Image: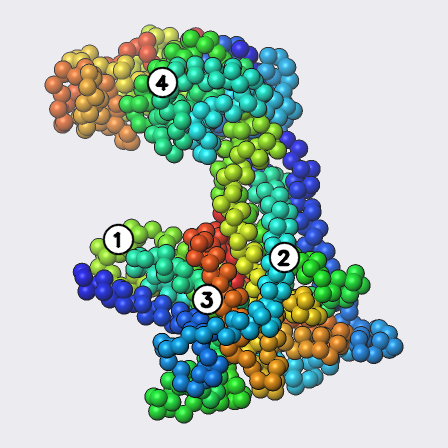
């Protein structure tokens, strides 16, 4: 039996190693001197330096993209979870015509290729003078954030026993009170998970951010990193440092909320 | 306490399923009425319609002669005990009990008193600060009851409240419910699929099948004068024996017979020669007799000791299908494969039309 | 119950209106736009109606078919590898339940990381001449190609990057499906004498079919729309050797500013996705989608 456990641990290690190695390499390299990055790569570096990070925040002002990402992702998450929760509640609980059509509609929209709506959105935003602004990103982000939150939350609301709301009705509570005191407190884990997943998607989004921002003052983190290239020589050290900074909050969220995330992904049948 | 009246109630679902068909029922105020029937008979639907959790396709519901058909559940002032209890999992027992009162803006002091009293009545005081997840099934059931009690509603609606309890607890709680009803004088509608519960609890019993009311009456009435063969076989345990017999008019009366069974009855019983009729006899109304006096003879197939009585399954000579069920006192020393002779109590023979199942009334 | 219809519409309308405005309306606009000539570099030419001219141009351009081919290759390779890898990963993680949390975290990290970062890290790993991959290959006595200058070899890091990121996600989806399979089925099979392989083919795979189909559809749709990883890792290069259809559309729109033409490409992408999704949902429809929606 001990052999089995060892084999098991070995199996798991073999599986985890390739998953984690690139991350490990990324982190290690971000602390390695530029000159040594390609010269003689070693698995465990002998000297760690902070040069790249200093350059990143000092010279390059990486704070701005971070701030932009936080604002856009935060605003989108807040809006879509707020609106989406109401919509999802209605879809999950109330009986009315056209419900199935609406659900199908939401699912269909989530399958839209983003590239297909870049041009009209660009022209629309240009008309509204919203290119390179925060609302100019939040609005397009709703195209994937809203279907996502609605789909996930419908799943979560459906898991709540309908009888609880019926009991509340028998107790004399109207819809609003029932929502406030019974449904929301119980749906809170689902809301949290949905918010986390939505935030992650927004933080990582690239195409819209690339298309609808014009300059460094509005770039989000992914765009800022991607456009590091195009200098004299590719500053790999800084790029890797930026990558680490971009990854850190995501990694933190995953570490803290991995159980929730899995629950969300599977309960709501999410698409990548 | 209120009276509840249902008039011409219909409920048809969008998939075509008919859950209630032209139902008419008057529940008197202060009465404990049991709605009993097999799964799918529509009894829970009727309860939910009374509660207002579902809307009827047509028909009216009156509470104290006031038409509440269009009134939403939160304004009907009824209390419901759900089969799954539906306790608010994130609130403590105390908060569960207090919720309905808070919604009605009752004063905090009075809420405290009522909660305390209800908890005392049901013996759940030590549980007041726990959450539902920390309670056993029986305890949760009491909390569900308490939630209804505390509200002092116009009527209580109970949806199979005892079904999820284990048998011992069920019997005890049943008695407590009866006591509670007597003390409160409350109007109660109790839904169950358990015929024993129906017989022991209800002042009146309403038997339902496939969305229709088969018969309404006191337990004794329904037991002694079932309106049709369904009601006759549904109530009473072990279930009534039913045989399809031919009948012939003899000079003295009517003879109903099937294979090895032959019974002479007085009068014409509204039957004609060569009619076929369903003959029903309860297991308790058949006895073992010396062969000379017998209506039929047979071989014992199964012996089930039930404690004070024994249930015998007897294969009557010539009869296919189910064996006859007979209940005898336990001290009778009968064994498997014994040949026995049986006799049926003449005044406990039920006759039903073999086409419609309706009871054939004696002339 | 009570008049829920009004409340239902009131609650759903804001969200649906928002979606309609930012997603549906643009699609119709794009379709309309694709029938016009609209080049932002030459605004004086206006926006004349040109019918199917843009589509004809697209369909007769080699670069277009190249892009479609690249997309097809990428989709086929990544979806196959991700489903297979995800299944293996899920089976392993399912078996060995120790340290579930740690494994789950490790498995989720690649998925959660921005695609941009993934693309850059893998570019870094494969960078010639002295990235770590080349370093290892040289030490093993092989002579690796200049990955990003070779039109065939370049697919390796591209596909690997996507597979690395998304296999764990597929594994998570399948793992949920695995855990829904009643353990007593395996026990019954073992008593009947079925070995590990038999159990896999007769119990696991059939019962996992809905989850596999869902994973297949979503991964395929995503692969077809691929943009981020290729843009960042190779920019579509060398030349246009790795350019997927989404990148070609992007270039036409926001680099060449040919909105009419770009719109036609957008519509083509949309229609192909739609047909694929509809076909899958029809196949998938009864079994999995019904089961999935709780």
Q: Residue under label 1, please give it.
A: C188
Q: Earlier in the sequence, mark 3 or mark 1?
A: 3
The structure residue drawn at horizontal position 70% and vertical position 55%, both measured from the top left corner, is C20
Q: Quadrant of the N terminus of chain C?
A: top right
SS type, badge 2: helix
Which of the two discs, 4 and 2, sits closer to the camera? Answer: 2
Q: Is residue B226 visible?
A: no
- Which is more foreground, mark 1 or mark 4? 4
Label 4 residue SS? loop
Of badges 2 and 1, the one in the foreground is 2
Asked if labels 3 and 1 share a chain, the reply is yes
Q: Which residue is mark 2?
A: A71
Q: Give the image location of residue B340, x and y in percent.
A: 16, 20
Dot 3 surroundings within 10 Å: few (below 14), some, or many (20 or more)? many
**Relative side of B127 to C153, left or right:** left
Q: Nearer the viewer, residue A240 or C263?
A: A240
State yes or no: discs 2 and 1 in contact (Cβ < 8 Å).
Answer: no
Q: CA distance from mark 2 to mark 1?
A: 55 Å
State which mark lies toward you, 2 or 3.
2
Quick one: label 1, few (<14), some, or many (20+) residues within 10 Å? few
In the picture of the structure, the residue carrying the numbered disc 3 is: C110
Marks 3/1: CA distance? 37 Å
Q: Residues within 10 Å of mark 4 (few under 14, many from 20)?
A: some
- Residue drawn at (54%, 47%) of the image: A191
Q: Are both tags, 3 and 4, on one chain?
A: no
Q: Which residue is mark 4?
A: B123
Instruction: Indicate the position of residue B303 as horizontal and vertical percent values.
Output: 18, 25
Q: Are marks 2 and 3 on the same chain?
A: no
Q: Which mark is residue A34?
A: none
C23 vs A21: above or below: above
Tell me the subunit letter for badge 1: C
Determine whether B57 is above or below A224 in the image: above
């Amino acid at each position: 039996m001990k052999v089995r456990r060892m084999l098991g641990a070995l199996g798991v290690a073999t599986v985890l190693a390739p998953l984690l190695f690139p991350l490990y390499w990324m982190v290690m390299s971000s602390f390695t001197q530029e000159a040594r990055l390609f010269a003689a790569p070693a698995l465990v570096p002998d000297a760690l330096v902070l040069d790249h990070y200093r350059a990143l925040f000092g010279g390059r002002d990486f704070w701005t993209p971070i701030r932009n990402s936080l604002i856009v992702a935060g605003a989108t998450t807040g809006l879509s979870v707020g609106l989406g929760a109401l919509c999802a509640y209605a879809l999950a609980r109330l009986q009315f015509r056209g419900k199935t059509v609406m659900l199908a509609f939401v699912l269909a929209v989530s399958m839209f290729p983003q590239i297909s709506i870049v041009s009209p959105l660009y022209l629309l935003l240009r008309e509204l003078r919203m290119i390179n602004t925060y609302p100019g990103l939040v609005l397009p982000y709703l195209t994937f954030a809203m279907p996502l939150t609605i789909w996930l939350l419908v799943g979560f609301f459906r898991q709540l026993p309908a009888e609880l709301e019926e009991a509340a009705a028998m107790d004399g509570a109207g819809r609003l009170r029932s929502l406030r005191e019974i449904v929301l407190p119980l749906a809170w884990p689902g809301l949290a998970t949905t918010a986390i997943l939505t935030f992650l998607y927004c933080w990582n989004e690239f195409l819209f951010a690339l298309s609808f921002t014009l300059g460094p003052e509005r770039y989000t983190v992914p765009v800022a990193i991607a456009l590091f290239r195009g200098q004299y020589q590719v500053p790999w050290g800084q790029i890797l440092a930026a990558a680490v900074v971009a990854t850190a909050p995501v990694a933190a969220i995953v570490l803290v909320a991995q159980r929730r995330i899995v629950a969300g992904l599977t309960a709501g049948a999410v698409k990548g | 306490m209120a009276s509840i009246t249902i008039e011409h109630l219909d409920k048809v679902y969008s998939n075509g399923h008919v859950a209630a068909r032209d139902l008419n029922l008057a529940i008197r105020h202060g009465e404990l009425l049991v709605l009993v029937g097999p799964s799918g008979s529509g009894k829970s639907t009727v309860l939910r319609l009374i509660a207002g959790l579902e809307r009827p396709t047509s028909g009216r519901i009156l509470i104290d002669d006031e038409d509440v058909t269009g009134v939403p559940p939160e304004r009907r002032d009824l209390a419901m005990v759900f089969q799954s209890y539906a306790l608010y999992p994130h609130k403590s027992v105390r908060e569960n009990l207090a919720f309905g009162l808070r919604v009605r803006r009752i004063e905090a002091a009075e809420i405290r008193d009522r909660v305390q009293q209800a908890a005392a009545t049901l013996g759940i005081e030590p549980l007041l600060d726990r959450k539902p997840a920390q309670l056993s099934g029986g305890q949760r059931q009491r909390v569900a009851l308490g939630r209804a009690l505390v509200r002092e509603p116009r009527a209580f609606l109970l949806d199979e409240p005892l079904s999820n309890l284990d048998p011992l607890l069920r019997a005890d709680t049943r008695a407590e419910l009866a006591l509670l009803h007597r003390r409160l004088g409350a109007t109660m509608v109790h839904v169950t699929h358990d015929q024993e519960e129906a017989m022991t609890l209800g002042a009146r019993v309403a038997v339902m099948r496939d969305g229709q009311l088969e018969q309404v009456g006191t337990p004794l009435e329904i037991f002694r004068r079932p309106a049709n063969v369904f009601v006759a076989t549904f109530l009473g345990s072990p279930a009534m024996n039913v045989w399809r017999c031919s009948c012939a008019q003899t000079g003295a009366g009517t003879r109903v017979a099937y294979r090895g069974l032959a019974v002479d009855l007085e009068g014409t019983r509204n039957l004609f020669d060569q009619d076929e009729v369903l003959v029903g006899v309860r297991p308790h109304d058949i006895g073992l007799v010396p062969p000379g006096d017998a209506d039929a003879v047979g071989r014992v197939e199964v012996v089930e000791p039930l404690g004070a009585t024994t249930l015998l399954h007897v294969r009557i000579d010539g009869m296919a299908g189910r064996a006859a069920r007979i209940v005898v006192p336990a001290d009778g020393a009968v064994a498997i494969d014994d040949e026995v002779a049986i006799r049926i109590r003449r005044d406990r023979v039920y006759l039903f039309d073999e086409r419609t199942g309706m009871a054939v009334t004696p002339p | 119950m009570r008049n829920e219809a009004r409340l239902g519409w009131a609650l759903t309308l804001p969200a649906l209106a928002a979606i309609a405005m930012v997603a549906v309306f643009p699609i119709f606009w794009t379709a309309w736009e694709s029938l016009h000539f609209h080049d932002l570099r030459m605004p004086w030419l206006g926006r004349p109606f040109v019918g199917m001219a843009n589509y004809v141009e697209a369909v007769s351009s080699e670069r277009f078919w190249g892009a479609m081919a690249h997309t097809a290759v990428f989709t086929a390779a990544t979806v196959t590898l991700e489903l297979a890898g995800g299944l293996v990963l899920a089976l392993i993680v399912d078996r060995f339940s120790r340290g579930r949390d740690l494994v789950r975290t490790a498995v989720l990290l690649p998925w959660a990381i921005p695609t941009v970062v993934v693309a850059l890290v893998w570019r870094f790993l494969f960078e010639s001449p002295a990235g770590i991959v080349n370093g290892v290959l040289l030490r093993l006595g092989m002579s690796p190609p200049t990955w990003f200058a070779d039109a065939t070899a370049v697919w390796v890091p591209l596909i690997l990057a996507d597979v690395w990121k998304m296999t764990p996600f597929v594994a998570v989806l399948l793992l949920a499906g695995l855990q829904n399979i009643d353990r007593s089925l395996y026990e019954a099979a073992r008593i009947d004498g079925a070995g590990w392989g038999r159990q896999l083919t007769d119990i696991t795979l059939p019962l996992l079919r809905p989850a596999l189909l869902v994973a297949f559809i979503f991964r395929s749709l995503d692969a077809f729309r691929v943009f981020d990883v290729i843009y960042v890792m190779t920019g579509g290069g060398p030349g246009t050797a790795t350019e997927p259809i989404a990148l070609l559309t992007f270039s036409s729109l926001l680099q060449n500013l040919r909105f009419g033409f770009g719109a036609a490409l957008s519509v083509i992408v949309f229609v192909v996705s739609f047909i694929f999704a509809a076909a899958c949902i029809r196949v998938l429809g009864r079994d999995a989608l019904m089961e999935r929606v709780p």
